[in-house]
Image (cartoon, rainbow, N blue to C red):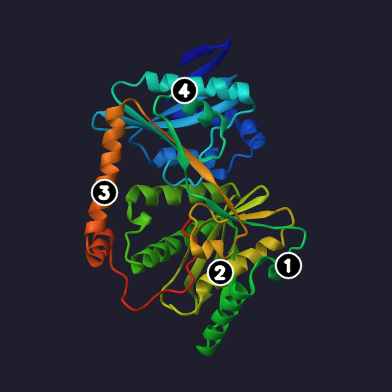
Amino acid sequence: MATVERSGQPAQVLTGPAAVTAALAAARDLLTATAAPVCARSEWLLSWLETYRNLEPVVVLAGSAADPDGLACLAVSRSGPVRTVTLLGDGPSDYGRLPVRDEQAAAVLATGITEVLAGLRGPWRLRLAQLPVGDPVAGRLHATLPGARLEPGQGCPRLRIGADRRIERLLSAQVRHTARQGRNRLARQGLSPDLELVTDPSTINVLLPELVAVHRERDHYLGRRSDLDDPVRLAFYRTVATRLAAARLLEVMTLRLDGTLAAYMVGIPDAAVYRLWDGRISMRWPKARLGRLIDTAVIDSVLGQPHIVELDWLRGELPHKLEVSNAVMPTEQLLAESSAPVRWLDRSAVELRRGARSALPDRLRRRLRGRPGRAGQQPDVPVPAG
């Protein structure tokens, strides 16, 4: 354990999975007090740590290790000579957090993160993504680290629920019409959607292979590789879903047609916010409006739970999310490098990738990303990808 002193306040820096586990347990009250979302808490971060193993976890604490006033869970990875520092959970996490109780704790935490960077051997880059706008720790790092930038992250559409919880007050007539149209189209085929909200952990575990199959089928239909084609991402998906279900923090709305899973939505009840983590529709019924059927069923279910005041569609300001939202939660990211050459190399690599993509014909680009979608068959309204 290293200890950094600033203005008489220690920032403690610890490394290793055991340190992360202990710090998250000790910071339970801090995470609750700062309303940290589920992807900044132990079930999510420990699942990520178990599956993304090619890194070094680092914890920075402000105040007492037994009851910290500030917490930064970081991950250090290496590619060639350059080390990259991110938040633990980077990639699958829709939100990043650096929870602190006050400005004093923010100052201590920022100092500790600066010392972590100073202790790295060789060049480094810092990428702290999906932070809330105005995060006090990021603000201090931005002012301290040479060349640091605060840039917009991906916004997260929200459906905020007021006193009137009737669905017709929250969803537009067009959205409700699309859902009815889907039911009518199914009825003309002699099909009736069988909707079920699954909350039992053991049943969810049995359901997971079906969810993965539909998830990948949908992505491939759209002409792209699926995130769940990646063995590590798939392992994380299964691990975190199992862990959240066991903690009664995950439930699945399923829609079956003739016994076959046709659509699903995975929700995470997170205090007063219901987070819509993952959803897909099967393309066996491409014109049945299954996306709108499943998401209106979820919204209707949530409206029956008075303690939930907001639905969170998570990151990505996509049209199908914005149509069922009335607000967007902005985020920002902090970027910094150890030197101007590292910064230049990173920017050059980004520009090179963009140039290469724009130079490729559309058909070849789709093939490089995954299986091409079927020409002339556009899916109906998609459900969130999480």
Task: Choose the circle earlier in sequence order: 3 or 2.
Answer: 2
Q: Is residue 35 above or below residue 120?
A: below
At label 1, the amino acid type is: Arg
Task: Choose the circle earlier in sequence order: 3 or 1.
Answer: 1
Q: Nearer the viewer, residue 34 or 190?
A: 34
The answer to the question of whether label 2 and label 1 lie on touching residues, with beta carbons closer than 8 A, is no
Question: Which residue is identified by label 3?
Answer: 353
Which residue is at a point 50% across and 88% down the rendered structure image?
Answer: 189
Label 2 sits on a secondary structure element that is helix
**How far apart, in angstroms, are the residues tagged by discs 3 and 4?**
30 Å
Q: Is residue 179 above or below residue 62?
A: below
Question: Which residue is identified by label 1?
Answer: 166
Q: Position of residue 6 (x, y in %)?
A: 54, 12
At label 4, the amino acid type is: Thr
At label 2, the amino acid type is: Ile
**How far apart, in angstroms, are the residues tagged by discs 4 and 1?**
49 Å
Q: Nearer the viewer, mark 2 or mark 4?
A: 4
**The disc label shown at residue 288, or none:** none
The answer to the question of whether label 3 and label 2 lie on touching residues, with beta carbons closer than 8 A, is no
Label 1 sits on a secondary structure element that is loop
Task: Choose the circle earlier in sequence order: 2 or 1.
Answer: 1
Which residue is at a point 56% across and 69% down the rendered structure image?
Answer: 294
Task: Choose the circle earlier in sequence order: 4 or 1.
Answer: 4
Question: Which residue is identified by label 4?
Answer: 144
